[in-house]
Amino acid sequence: MKEKFSIITSTCVPLPVENVDTDQIIPARFLKATSRDGFGENLFRDWRYDSEGNPKKEFVLNNPRYSGCILVAGKNFGCGSSREHAAWAIADYGFRVVVSSFFADIHKNNELNNFVLPVVVSESFLAELFASIEADPATKVEVNLTEQTITNLATERRENFDIDPYKKQCLEKGLDDIELMLARKADIEAFETKRAYPQL
């Protein structure tokens, strides 16, 4: 069981770059591992470190001004290949929410499957959020999964976001697909007991 989603209020890490593909999120050379653990240290590896492994001071993850469990990204986040490892890296780093004006569909689903909530907002909301964070890195955002709202607490601007009802239930209960099915085992068995099967 994962940590249940309800309301998340956090400062944000801004990444105002469009068309961030999954190879930039986690380079292909790190895909040999089969465990989800440890991918966070290589999140945005080539942007984050130089060829000798030294942190690049200009990259946002190395900037002490920015922190939090919400990543705010530019339009078309997670494009390119469908590698699930990209979502592993985001989750393992500690991000619980990614905000963008558009996600690649496969990556969006991979995030949901790894208990990271992708929140799609309008381009104007995203631009305002980036401006708020730039003006004050202490800016906080509230993401309410139950109400399906996101609020920029610096401006009080709020938008609704969409999410598949089934995936919403998984996040709220902190259960993956298998765990959710097992939680309904008694109901499934009761249904099977009452079901009439044709005689062979």
Image (tube, helix red, strand yellow):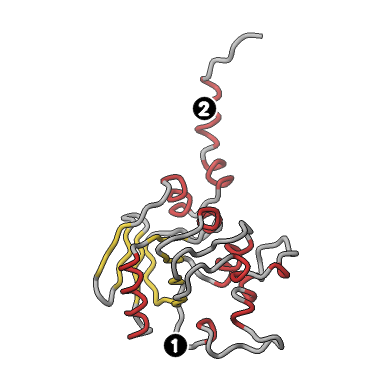
Q: Front-most of 181 and 112?
A: 112
Point 28% across, 74% down: residue:
153
Q: 59 or 195: which is nearer to us?
A: 59
| Above or below: residue 18 compared with residue 182 | below
Q: Which mark is residue 65?
A: 1
Residue drawn 73% across the image and 70% down it: 29
Which amino acid is tagged 2?
Ala
198, above or below 60, in the image: above
Check the image and name the residue furthest to the right. 32
Image side of residue 3 versus residue 92, left or right: left
Dot 2 corresponds to which residue? Answer: 190
Q: Amino acid at mark 1?
A: Arg
Q: Position of residue 88 (x, y in %)?
A: 60, 63
* Residue 76 horizontal/vertical position (percent): 47, 63
Q: Are marks 1 and 2 in contact (CB under 8 Å)?
A: no
- Position of the C terminus by quadrant: top right
Q: Is residue 102 visible?
A: yes
Whole-percent x and y of residue 142? 34, 68
Q: What residue is rendered at 38% in x and 84% in y?
A: 137
Farthest residue to the left: give it: 156
* Quadrant that contains the N terminus: bottom right
Q: Tag 2's secondary structure?
A: helix
Vertically, is 119 above or below 175?
below
| Left or right: 29 in relation to 66 | right
Residue 70 visible (yes or no)? no
Is 135 on the left or on the right of 2, as rendered? left
How packed mark 2 is, by other alpha carbons closer than 10 Å (few <14, some 14-19, many 20 or more), is few
| Residue in the foreground of this view, choosing between 143 and 20 | 20
Label 1 or label 2, whichever lies nearer to me, is: 1
Residue 180 at x, y percent in the picture: 53, 45
